[in-house]
Image: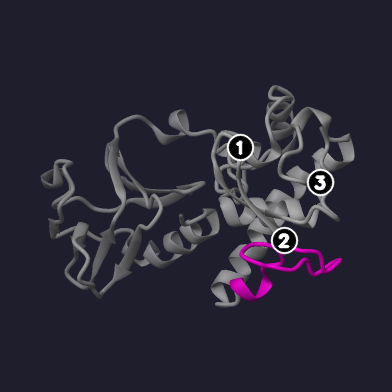
Amino acid sequence: MPEGPSILIARESLLPFVGKKIEAVTGNTKIDKARLAGQTIRDIKTWGKHLLISFDGFTLKIHFMMFGTYLINERKTTPLRLSFQFKKGEVNFYTCSVQFLDEEIDQLYDFSADVLGDSWNPRKAGWKLKKIPDALVCDALLDQAIFAGVGNIIKNEVLFRIKVHPESRVGKLPDRIRQALIRESRNYSFDFLQWKKAYTLKKHWLVYNKKICPRDHSLIQREHLGHTNRRSFFCETCQICYE
């Protein structure tokens, strides 16, 4: 699943189409495509893993799910979910969820939860964590209401970076560790963004999809954990479990 930094890169790639009128719309999406034809893109924003394309009076939300992709001025054989044709150029979306939002997006989204956003509020994230003391940290980090944009790679790498076992309980974390969790969720997301742009992301993985811990050379454990049942990679030697 594309994580927040990848969606931010998508936004940057699509910004040249802001102010451009959509001449034609195609694709197998079930939304009313005719509503988009002739519309001008007014802005492009992101919230976590959501790409938000703004038009006059409404917004189009695109979620790339697990395997969604987009291409600019090129196509692939996968069936098109949605395609925008402009006088010069086209944008094609594949294997994604598409939805109209008629409300103001500021009323729909808590932008203070976006770990890559200018409005990110770490104190508010701390308050939210205190409300879920029994949650596992591997679930808490994937809670988009707290850490919008954090996905499974960021989750694993953050927990390894701060030496916390994924089955730790949120309420058992010492204050300094909880603050590190909040801080590094944002720091690692920006590192991810930088490495993704440089095409070096995988070279910087320390625990995700790894077999040996780079700190103490123990075997990396792989398990599906928590309510989210997502894969966790962790070292039982250097990552402390707070229970």
Secondary element at image label 1: loop
Q: Please count the marks in the image.
A: 3
Image-quadrant location for residue 228: top right
Which of the labelled discs sits on residue 226, or is there none?
A: 1
The residues bearing labels 3 and 1 have C-alpha atoms spaced at a distance of 21 Å
* Residue 161: percent from left, percent from top: 78, 57
The residues bearing labels 2 and 3 have C-alpha atoms spaced at a distance of 22 Å
Image-quadrant location for residue 87: bottom left
Q: Nearer the observer, disc 2 or disc 3?
A: 2
Q: Is residue 18 rendered to the left or right of residue 80?
A: right
Q: Magenta region's main secondary structure? A: loop
Lower position in the chain sequence, tag 2 or tag 1: 2
Mark 3: amino acid: Ala
- Magenta stretch holds residue 218: yes
Height in image: 204 above or below 143?
A: below
Looking at the rendering, the stretch of residues picked out in magenta corresponds to 201-219
Mark 1: amino acid: Gly
Which of the labelled discs sits on residue 220, or is there none?
A: 2
* Residue 115: percent from left, percent from top: 62, 47
* Residue 51: percent from left, percent from top: 40, 50
Lower position in the chain sequence, tag 2 or tag 3: 3
Height in image: 162 above or below 192?
A: above
